[in-house]
Image (cartoon, coloured by chain):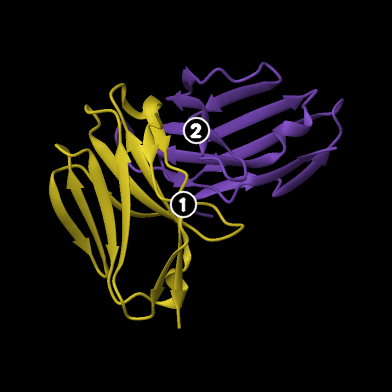
Chain colours: A purple, B yellow
Amino acid sequence: ETGVTQTPRHLVMGMTNKKSLKCEQHLGHNAMYWYKQSAKKPLELMFVYNFKEQTENNSVPSRFSPECPNSSHLFLHLHTLQPEDSALYLCASSQGDNQPQHFGDGTRLSIL
Amino acid sequence: QKEVEQNSGPLSVPEGAIASLNCTYSDRGSQSFFWYRQYSGKSPELIMFIYSNGDKEDGRFTAQLNKASQYVSLLIRDSQPSDSATYLCAVIGTGGYQKVTFGTGTKLQVIP
């Protein structure tokens, strides 16, 4: 398997549920990213991890909790989400600073 | 003021014509510039990246960068219907990959 793999592809959850999104990259990259993409809005960078250390948190609400156990895996733990959190969540990886990012297929999240 | 600006389109061009997509950015210290293509319902796919002033060509695609004018463009020669997609401009500003910013994208329609 190559590239960046995200699971699940689709997720429907209630506002009180707890779920996790998973991302795995097979490119040997050292940086991983979580983005949110909503309709009519640009991609929003949420979190950045470099060598599994978090280097950026773009004022993301605490109901989103990232975890990066190693350079190849990235999780986004979700709890008590709001309807406005419904969006496409994209994971990406890159080799390092100023290098292109490669995206996974995303998880389409719907909050009921 | 938006950090990365793109005309949302749609930009309609006939098959075989040259499509010209433009992007301006506000961070004068930006060093890295990327173009991604995103088909409806899919994740962004890297098309081109450019770091230095001037032109960079790859097949039918040419990226042009003018740092003095804070302007980056993407030219698509011999446009094909399969090029119909949304094209995202991404810029890494001062602060490195933690400061990657995407534009809202330009929707391109190639008319057969």
Q: Is residue A95 visible?
A: no
Q: Chain of mark 1?
A: B
Q: Is residue A43 visible?
A: yes
In percent of width and height, residue A11 lies at: 77, 43
User: Disc 1 marks which amino acid?
Assistant: Ser
User: Disc 2 marks which amino acid?
Assistant: Tyr
In percent of width and height, residue B34 lies at: 32, 46
Does residue A109 appear left or right of residue A103 in this picture? right
In percent of width and height, residue B110 lies at: 44, 74
Foreground mark, 2 or 1, reads 1
Residue A33 — which label? 2
Quarter holding the C terminus of chain B?
Answer: bottom left
Q: Chain of mark 2?
A: A
Closest to the observer, B52 or A55? B52
Quarter holding the N terminus of chain B?
Answer: top left
Numbered marks: total? 2
- Under circle 2, the secondary element is strand
What residue is shown at x 29% (from left), y 57% (from top)?
B74
Closest to the observer, B25 or A55? B25
Residue B8 — which label? 1
Q: Is residue B43 above or below residue A99?
A: below
